[in-house]
Amino acid sequence: MTFADLWRELEPLGRDPQTGGYRRYSWTEADAQCRAWFTVQAQRRGLTVEPDHNGNLWAWWGPPGAGAIATGSHLDSVPDGGGFDGALGVVSALAAVDLLREKDFYPERSVVLAVFTEEEGARFGVPCLGSRLMTGVMDPDRARALSDNKGVTLATAMAAAGFDPARIGPDEQRLSGLAAFVELHVEQGRALAPLDAPVGIARSIWPHDRWRLEFAGRPDHAGTTRLADRHDPMLPYAGTVLAARQAAAAHGSLATFGKVIAVPGGTNGISSSVTAWLDARAPDEATLEATIATIRSAAEKFSTEHNVTLTASQESHTPLVRFDPALSNRLATTLAGSEPLPVLPTGAGHDAGFLAARIPAAMLFVRNPTGVSHSPAERADLADCEAGVRALAAVLEDLAGRP
Ligand code: GLV
Ligand code: MN
Ligand code: MN
């Protein structure tokens, strides 16, 4: 099947007709449809599909065993996400297998296609949950207790989907069987757009923190409570949003509040609480720490000023990732044309980052003409996606073509 044929099949799954964005949250019906689609596609190609204990899917081309070359990405999305983030890597992996088969290539080392679960952390709050659990970075008890906006825990959601949550956790046996992981992903920025390069190679990923800030105030009447008498949690929240922007500008980092819940949410009432999630990223760990410290102290100061109680909790930390130089250089050599491929850092998180801590890992980025991502407007041109498939196939041919 061509890339375009595969894309057309996956495209409608989990797409909201109103916004055109994707709502492929892990362990939901949309997620099940995506998993089923991948499973059928892999099986049609004669690959052996096995879910692991953490809910990630693995499709083997060749016998499962030591020295395998893994590729793939994720199929879950952020709220109203774009169609390419994650899905491009999975579809390209299937298309690359087809391309290699057309050339009568058979891997000396097994190739395994991976689909990681809850990469975005859109439902349970912790990004790259499947690869975090697999690599032992996430405590399984903490993971089981994570809950979504409706209070459904990961354990309950997994059990409802037919998985045993008691079995989640480190998967040393699987990791020890992988010689390398190469993730292809849509670029989430505009570094490649001005260059004559449909594909680039990742150098590093910025460290990343997520914090939950709960401002607890006192609910009261919007029409009768004197300003001086209020304990309004919206005010320290608002001050903190602006302080985060200033801190990011001052430190050369990024800080974002993209999710906020005001309770009880009445137009004519002062909120009892405002809970907001901070996403902060920086080029290095010290800058990230300094950014967060500045934002937290602003949140404390504003809360005190407005008689509001603040509870700040770190929901996740993702350390700085430097991809394996030897593997990245090998990709660069395999893919070099008249010009070397651009090598880029990124602020976006990826499962390849967690695998990079344990096995040689590398990433390929496919050009995004606008740079927009985590949005229904996310795009990649078909010709660039096809160039990505050819690049991934060449990399797999090189890595898996020799014992
Ligand atoms: C994942 O896309 C992230 O960087 O949040
Ligand atoms: Mn994403
Ligand atoms: Mn992604």
Image: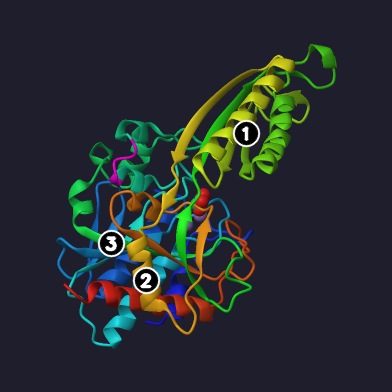
How many numbered circles does the render carry?
Answer: 3
Range of magenta residues: 134-138
Judge left or right: residue 371 versus residue 102: right
Mark linked to residue 180: 3
Residue 134 is left or right of residue 267, and the answer is left
Q: Which residue is mark 1?
A: 261
Q: Secondary structure at mark 3?
A: strand
Sequence order check: which comes first, mark 3 or mark 2? 3
Residue sitting at the far bottom? 103
Q: Does the segment drawn in magenta span residue 180?
A: no
- Mark 2 or mark 1, whichever is nearer to me: 2
The amino acid beneath tag 1 is Ile
Whole-angstrom CA distance, mark 2 to mark 1, is 44 Å
The answer to whether the beta carbon of the residue marked 2 is less than 8 Å from any atom of ligand 3 is no
Of 158 and 54, nearer the camera is 54
Q: Residues within 10 Å of mark 1 (few under 14, many from 20)?
A: some
Examine the residues drawn in magenta and state their main secondary structure: loop
Q: Nearer the viewer, mark 3 or mark 2?
A: 2
Which of the labelled discs sits on residue 331, or is there none? Answer: 2
Indicate the secondary structure of the residue bearing disc 1. strand
The part of the image, by quadrant, that contains residue 304 is top right
- Please tell me which of labels 1 and 3 falls first in the chain: 3
In this rendering, the answer to whether 247 lies above or below 377 is above
Which residue is rendered at x = 37% and y = 61% of the image?
325
Please name the colour scheme applied to the rendered image: rainbow
Residue plotted at (49% across, 80% down): 339
Name the kind of residue labelled 2 in the image.
Leu
* Distance Cα–Cα, label 3 vs label 2: 12 Å
In the rendered image, residue 301, in percent from the top left (x then y), is placed at 69, 20
**Helix, strand or loop at mark 2:** helix
309 relative to 277, above or below: above
Q: Residues within 10 Å of mark 3 (few under 14, many from 20)?
A: many
